[in-house]
């Protein structure tokens, strides 16, 4: 019941033909194709700037250095 069989697909196509008519279906398909293509292009345009990665690494290394320095100071005060 969870899978779409050939009969199910024929029913879906028949309903689309009834609602939209044979003239509108190619236009709907074309619009859907353009929307999917636009979405894929937008996803490909999202790139990470290498400068951002270097800045992030600098921030992390600075935070780790400060953390290790505070641990050393804490150890000295306990001794």
Image (tube, rainbow, N blue to C red):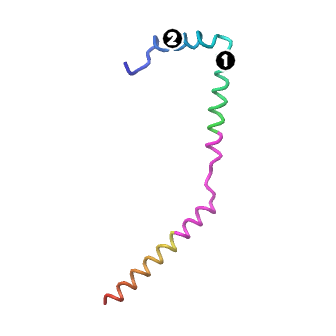
Give the magenta-colored segment's residue range: 41-59
Q: Is residue 56 magenta?
A: yes
Numbered tag placed on residue 36 in the rendering:
none
Q: Residue furthest left?
A: 79
Q: Residue at x 64, y 27 (%)?
A: 33
Q: Secondary structure at mark 2?
A: helix
The quadrant in which the N terminus is found is top left
10 Å neighbourhood of mark 2: few (<14), some, or many (≥20)?
few
Q: Quadrant of residue 18?
A: top right
- Give yes or no for residue 76 being in the magenta stretch: no
Q: Earlier in the sequence, mark 2 or mark 1?
A: 2
- Residue 49 in the image, given as x and y percentages of width and height: 63, 57
Distance, label 2 to label 1, CA atoms, is: 17 Å
Residue 23's image quarter?
A: top right
Residue 36 is left or right of residue 3, and the answer is: right
Q: Quadrant of the C terminus?
A: bottom left
59 left or right, relative to 29? left
Question: Residue 46 location, x and y as percent?
Answer: 62, 48
Residue of label 2: 10
Kindly give the residue lying farthest to the front in the view shown: 19
What kind of element bears circle 1?
A: helix
For residue 15, above or below residue 3: above
Residue found at x 47% / y 78%: 66
Measured as percent of width and height from the top left, residue 48 is found at 61, 54
Q: Position of residue 20 (x, y in %)?
A: 62, 13
Q: Which residue is mark 1?
A: 26
For the stretch drawn in magenta, the main secondary structure is helix
Please tell me which residue lies in front, 3 or 16.
16
Q: Which residue is found at the position 44% from the left and 18% from the top?
A: 4
How many marks are shown on the rendered structure? 2
């Amino acid at each position: 019941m969870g899978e779409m069989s050939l009969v199910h697909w024929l029913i879906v196509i028949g309903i689309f033909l009834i609602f939209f008519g044979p003239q509108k279906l190619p236009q709907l398909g074309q619009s859907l194709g353009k929307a999917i293509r636009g979405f894929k292009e937008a996803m490909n345009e999202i790139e990470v700037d290498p400068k951002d990665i270097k800045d992030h690494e600098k921030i992390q290394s600075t935070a780790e250095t400060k953390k290790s320095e505070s641990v050393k100071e804490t150890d000295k005060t306990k001794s």
